[in-house]
Amino acid sequence: MDTSQAKPTAEQVKEWNEDKLLDWINKKLPKPLKDDTIKKFKKAEISGRAFLTLAGNVEFFKNEFNLPIGPSLALADLAREAAGTVPHLEKDVASMLEGLASLKRQLEEEKKGSDEDASTGKLRTFGTGPRY
């Protein structure tokens, strides 16, 4: 894997033709693409712009190019890197925010119940156990 070259911007990658893209991919991957995969890339006319739209799309590389999961992941992650996105970040952040919102609602409900119990002098019960 060649890390000595400056990382191209997404705008630069968009302008690349299939040959320039494949050259860059083969320099970046720890193991160059096999000849049959290169032929599939060229036949599919995957330019830089098309490659960027595939950022993170493991299934595309796996199904359309019939690649094993390892190279599919590597290509999807490389497309993500070229596009300037962080792996799984969008889904992870959305999931975490959803979880935090749910937790916040639960805490607000518990606090509301606790405040109501304090004002009435009643003890709040949890579950079906005995009241103390």
Image: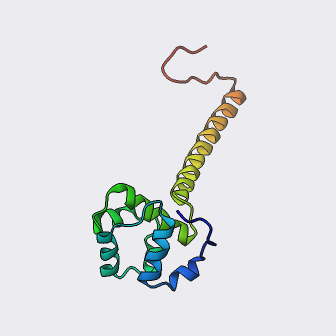
Q: Residue at x 47, y 71 (%)?
A: 25
- Answer with left or right where residue 9 lies relative to residue 79: right
Q: Residue at x 48, y 20 (%)?
A: 128
**Quadrant of the image containing the C terminus:** top right
Q: Looking at the picture, tell me which residue is in the foreground, 96 or 118.
A: 96
- Answer with left or right where residue 66 lies relative to residue 20: left
Tag count? 0
Up/down of 35 relative to 17, above or below: above
Instruction: Give the residue furthest to the right.
Output: 119
Instruction: Please tell me in which quadrant of the rendered image residue 111 appears.
Output: top right
- Answer with left or right where residue 103 lies relative to residue 79: right
Up/down of 123 relative to 62, above or below: above
Q: Residue at x 35, y 66 (%)?
A: 61
Instruction: Please tell me in which quadrant of the rendered image residue 116 appears.
Output: top right
Q: Looking at the picture, tell me which residue is in the foreground, 12 or 91.
A: 12
Up/down of 57 relative to 96, above or below: below
Q: Looking at the picture, tell me which residue is in the foreground, 10 or 38.
A: 38
Q: Residue at x 50, y 74 (%)?
A: 24
Colour convention of the picture: rainbow
User: Residue 84, how many percent across, how many down?
Assistant: 58, 69
User: Residue 100, how many percent across, how many down?
Assistant: 60, 47
User: Residue 91, how many percent across, how many down?
Assistant: 51, 57
